[in-house]
Image (cartoon, grey):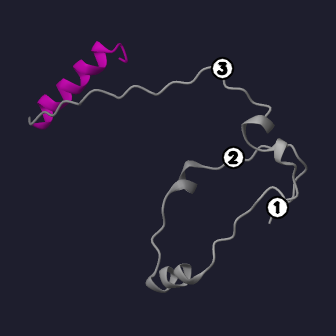
Amino acid sequence: MLSVEMPCVLTVLATANKARYMTVSGIMDAFEKEVEIWTAAKIDIAPEKLGLKGSPTRVKKSFTKAQKGAGETFEVDAEEGVNIIINKLKEKHII
C-alpha cells in the first residue's frame, strides 16, 4: 500500500498491462470472490474532484497514430539480403 498527498501523478511501465496466465485454482478462487465497487464516498473524495470535471488537465487535440504500410519480404541468399538492407538504409538517408 502506498500513501501520497494529493494531487499526485502515477506512472507504470508498459509491461504492467501484460496479461498473466492464471492457474486453474486461481480461476476458481476468482470466480467465487465478490467484486468490490469503489465509490467516491468509499475512497473519501468529493465527486466533483473525480473524472473529467475534476481533472486539471485539458486535452487540446488528440489523434490516432497512422498504421504502417505492409512490409516487404525477400527470399534471397545472405549476400543479396545484405545489399538490399544497405540500399534501403541509404534510401532513407540513415547511412
**Image position of 82 with respect to 15: above or below:** above
Q: Identify the secondary structure beneath mark 3.
A: loop
Q: In the figure, residue 24 lies in which quadrant?
A: bottom left
Distance from disc 2 to disc 3, alpha carbons, whole Å, reads 22 Å
Magenta region, residue range: 77-95
Mark linked to residue 17 = none
Residue closer to the observer: 83 or 65: 65
Distance from disc 1 to disc 3, alpha carbons, whole Å, reads 32 Å
Residue at 52 percent across and 80 percent down: it is: 31
Image quarter of the C terminus? top left
Q: Identify the secondary structure beneath mark 1.
A: loop
Q: Residue flagged by tag 3: what amino acid is it? A: Lys
Q: Identify the secondary structure beneath mark 2.
A: loop
Mark linked to residue 11 = 2
Residue 40 spot, x, y in % from top left? 81, 55
Quickly name the residue at label 1: 2
Q: Are marks 2 and 1 in contact (CB under 8 Å)?
A: no
Q: Residue flagged by tag 1: what amino acid is it? A: Leu
Quickly name the residue at label 3: 60
**Image position of 53 with respect to 29: above or below:** above
Q: Is residue 87 magenta?
A: yes
Residue at 82 percent across and 63 percent down: it is: 42
Badge 3: residue crowd in 10 Å (few <14, some 14–19, many ≥20): few
Residue 60 spot, x, y in % from top left? 66, 20
